[in-house]
Amino acid sequence: MGLIAYAVFGGADFGGGVWTALASGPRAGQQREAVFRAMGPVWETNHIWLIFVIVTLFTAFPAAFAQLFTALFIPLVIALLGIIFRGAAFAFRHFGDGNEAQVPLVGSFFSIASIITPLAMGIALGAVAGGHITTRGGASEPWLRPFPLVTGLIGVAVCAFLTACFMTDRTDGQLREDFRRRGILASVALGALTTVALIVASWDAKPFWERLSSPVPVAVISVAVVMGLASLVVLWRRLYALAPSVAAGTVALVLAGWGVVQYPYLILPDQRISDLAAGTTTLVPFLVSLVIGAVVLVPSLVFLYRTFSEKTG
Amino acid sequence: MVLDSLTSARALMGASLAFHIIFATIGIGLPLLLLIAEGLALRTGDGMYRDMAKRWGRVAALLFAVGAVSGTALSFEFGLLWPKWMEFAGGVIGFPFALEGFAFFIEAIFLSLYIYGWDRLSPRVHWLCAIPIVLCSAASAFFVISVNGWMNQPAGFTVADGKVVSVDPFAVIFNPAMPYEVIHGTLAAYVAMGFAVAGVYAVAMLRGDQSAYNRKALTLGLAVAAVFTVIQLVSGDASARFLAHNQPEKFAAMEAQFETERGAPLRIGGFPDPATRTTPYAIEIPKLASLLTFFDPNAEVRGLNSFPPDEIPDPRFVHYPFQVMVGIGSFLLLVAAWFWATVWRRRAVRPGRPLLLAIVAAAPLGFVALEAGWLVTEFGRQPWIIYKVMRVSEGVTTQQGVGVVLLTFLLVYVVLTIGLLVLLLRERRRPVEGSARRTEGSGGA
């Protein structure tokens, strides 16, 4: 049961991670305009993923929810502030018909929020893997350590990388070149940071490091590395149509790699998924509700998609 | 730090909910007005109603988005402020919250269809898109308020060793308090929104713009407001009676009933004083509380003295907002009656200046009443976070520094509110896209 719940949670988390990242354009200047236009429709969905992740966490793993939100109080408060500002900036800007002059300050709020949110989220995830949140309470600020701080930077790099790759497929001319250059930079940075993270893990996140060497994590992480290199090649050779899927694939594999390293622990080093999961009478109705919800949701989404794809040419 | 964690956490949760409730209310109420306005446009071919629906749709989308943000903040705050409560109750209330998530998602989908679909959908299909918005927003209210009902009348779970071991999700959602809270809370959104819309156009008319557009929008707002205010009166009466039977501490605090007595009076106003156990300056109508509650003028009403002293709410925090809610509710009923009496007498929508001023006053008051009613529910439940199961103080975080977070978020809410007001006031001067009318002058909103 815990396994199914984990699959759902993982799925939602993955989606949440990707979409949250998607909507984080960290660049100032004229690219912001294009990013706003492209990301506007995605923004609401992004929020919903996040809410689903949180609802899943507190429903299926109430004990983990309580622990994480206590131990990671500060990074989560910061992430929340970022989410509020980013969400509000999107809404305000949209209402002002996308004209920056009409809605001053919104742009800078948006940029700052877009950087601190993935940073804080990355720190929080790093702390979950870092092995300093234990049943005995552990360190007082388990996130304020080298490994989580590096994963925080990875969070920002992931967002920068994803956004740049997606944007190359949605722009052209000089703007596209800009995003291509940024995408290459971001993917190199991402690769470098991930390497640094692994090195740091060897002394700061021992439980994580020790679990890395088993065959499944090695396999998934190798594929992730190959995918990351592929994205670099795609950008280099200007195969823009492939860029979004390669980028999303890379990030998905990194997350999956993290997941398989963690499994069967929800919080390293000593708390298993099965220890933290809620009872069957909670999980079964919850999963049923997800299925019922999806049954209503999918046709609505299809209708939305159809309505707005017909005449856009 | 002057503020301890518990006080700060309560203040922050309260502020965040108070902020969110405004947007949730508009998100529930405004779609109904959209549906009616566009329906009228389809039926009568009157383009003015179409303009109303277009403009209100834009506003609804903006406020819906802000509501999504403030709702996300609340889901974080559950964990940040009340981890122990969530550890206990997360598995119980997750089911309604998951369903709420879907309702919210579907509402978002149809709202985007509605806002961006004016030129892409046939008029009839476009109008039909408003129906899922109305239904899903009401469903969201249903699920969220049902959780609040559960906190007041917990049901559908068994506990062993301080942990929830089994859950019956339907018994959780259909807890005894749910029907009363859900109906009263949802109707309140329609009442508040009806008066709010009417108030905006009353301002325009006071400024001298007596255009047909303004008169129609005003009438529409007051039609919705009047119908729902009347139903709300019935629902409020039923809710109070439910509380007298099922949560008598809350009822006693609402009525400032310190001592158990037969033939209890109805206390209007006054300042309940827990030290002297009296309510000076209250207007007391003899035996009315007993009569209204138990249909017997000599029935016994339980006072706060009949409960353990550490299990009762502070009557001041409950009696005042209750008086505010009931007082405003009565005022709103009067305003609606006044308006429709004028329309009926003059056979036309030509409200005089005093009536328009009353409508303008009613616009924010609907929201004040709604917030006050929410305060009655929340303060009346104290000291429990889950009635007779868990105390608020047992649910709070062990983290320090909540006071700083409280101040930060208060600042954030102030900034957001100012930003929104600036945007909305600017919207008044903006012509409706593709409108038949050339300008709206100061009249539009």
Image (cartoon, coloured by chain):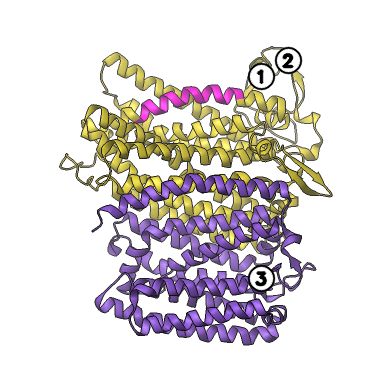
Chain in yellow, by letter, is: B
| Residue B62 to residue A134: above or below | above
Q: Bounds of the magenta span?
A: B221-238
- For residue A109, side relative to residue B352 (left or right): right
- Viewer-nearest of discs 3 and 2: 3
- Label 1 resides on the chain identified as B
Which x, y percent locates residue A188? 46, 85
- Residue highlighted by disc 1: B293
Label 2 belongs to which residue? B299
* Residue drawn at point x = 72 percent, y = 38 percent: B156
Q: Specify the amino acid type for callout 3.
A: Val
Q: Residues within 10 Å of mark 3 (few under 14, many from 20)?
A: many
Assign a secondary structure to mark 1: helix
Q: Are marks 1 and 2 in contact (CB under 8 Å)?
A: yes
**Magenta-colored segment: predominant secondary structure:** helix
Image quarter of the C terminus of chain B? top left
Residue toward you, A96 or B306: A96
Where does residue A95 sit, x and y in percent of width and height?
Answer: 33, 54
Q: Between marks 1 and 2, how big is the CA–CA gap?
A: 9 Å
Q: Is residue B27 above or below residue B269?
A: below
Type of residue at label 1?
Thr
Q: Where A82 falls versus B69 (above or below)?
A: below
Q: Is residue B235 magenta?
A: yes
The residue marked by circle 3 belongs to what chain?
A
Residue identifier under label 3:
A128
Would you say B438 lies left or right of B151 here?
left
> Where B160 falls versus B358 (above or below)?
below
What residue lies at 50% left-to-right and 71% top-to-bottom?
A116
Question: Can you tell which chain is drawn purple?
Answer: A
**Which residue occupies the foreground of this view, B327 or A124?**
A124
